[in-house]
Amino acid sequence: MESIKKLADMILESQYAIAFTGAGASTESGIPDFRGPNGLWKQYRAEEIASRWALENNTHDFFEFYRMRLAAMENIKPNRVHYGLAELENMGLLKAVITQNIDGLHKKAGSKRVYEIHGNIREAYCDRCGKKYPAEKLLEEDIPTCDVCGGIVRPNVVLFGEGLPQDQWIGAVREAEAADLVLSIGSSLTVYPAAMIPITVKEAGGKLVIINLEPTGYDSMADLVIHEKAGDVIEALLEEIKNRG
Ligand code: APR
């Protein structure tokens, strides 16, 4: 496939390649995306269930939704995308992964430099005092409360209407500023500020590759667009790189 050869050329020629991943990187692991044909936001209204407003005003449904998401992620495993990106990092060809996903699968697959800019559903914290808890705390009662201050304990995920975790976001921006190539994998590039990461690389003179089943609003500014399954692309890319020795 011509585009795989071009992708391999771009990676091998880059000095500082990074990956930016969205829900489409985890669909092969059995986790639905949000805006694809069977996406979660086809069944739920995001602002009513995954927002700051929902935590405060639709609290019971909010926790039901996140307990459902936790249960759905109970036994999930990394797929070819996660393992492939970890292998590229081990080969010194990929410097970091910046992910919008909260499933923790990049770290589980062995990626070392990972920025979880929308949080991690396996962690929770008290909304009032910040005390950290494992996600199991969310299963203890209908509306989980903090042992120390009695505040509500919520999942460590960025809700619509909330800011991003500063340490992860600042790190991700630094990676984007250092990168000369970014692979945007499985993202509709519709949510901000996350989508600024690949755009920052491109606008600073770097190259943008978009690997996504559906077209995105940034396809026209990309240096390479591949509308195929991310798992197939990453698998073929690694094969191409290994064949070149
Ligand atoms: N290979 C390639 N692309 C895929 C695959 C796959 N196997 N499966 C799905 N896709 C594509 C879909 O076509 C879709 O365009 O991945 C994209 C996922 O887009 P979204 O569902 O919008 O997910 P994402 O971009 O990660 O959403 C960003 O929105 O709801 C918030 O916080 C949530 O982090 C999420 C953010």
Image (cartoon, rainbow, N blue to C red):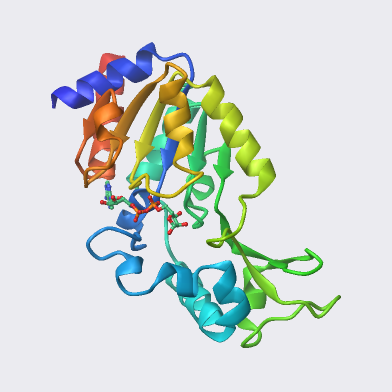
User: Residue 230 at what x, y percent from top left?
Assistant: 28, 42
In the depicted structure, whether residue 162 falls above or below residue 165: below
On screen, residue 81 versus residue 62, left or right, reads: left
The tally of labels here is: 0
On screen, residue 120 versus residue 22, left or right, reads: right
On screen, residue 231 versus residue 91, left or right, reads: left
| Res 130 → quadrant | bottom right
Q: Give the residue furthest to the left.
A: 1
In the depicted structure, whether residue 46 falls above or below residue 56: above
On screen, residue 129 versus residue 41, left or right, reads: right
User: Residue 45 at what x, y percent from top left?
Assistant: 39, 72
In the depicted structure, whether residue 122 falls above or below residue 10: below
**Front one among 132 and 237:** 132
Q: Residue at x 29, y 20 (%)?
A: 8
Q: Residue at x 43, y 16 (%)?
A: 205
| Res 39 → quadrant | bottom left
The answer to whether one can see residue 8 in this image is yes
User: Residue 245 at what x, y percent from top left?
Assistant: 31, 14
The answer to whether one can see residue 239 in this image is no
Q: Residue at x 68, y 81 (%)?
A: 144
Question: Looking at the figure, which quarter contains the N terminus?
Answer: top left
User: Residue 139 at what x, y percent from top left?
Assistant: 61, 81
Q: Give the residue furthest to the right.
A: 148
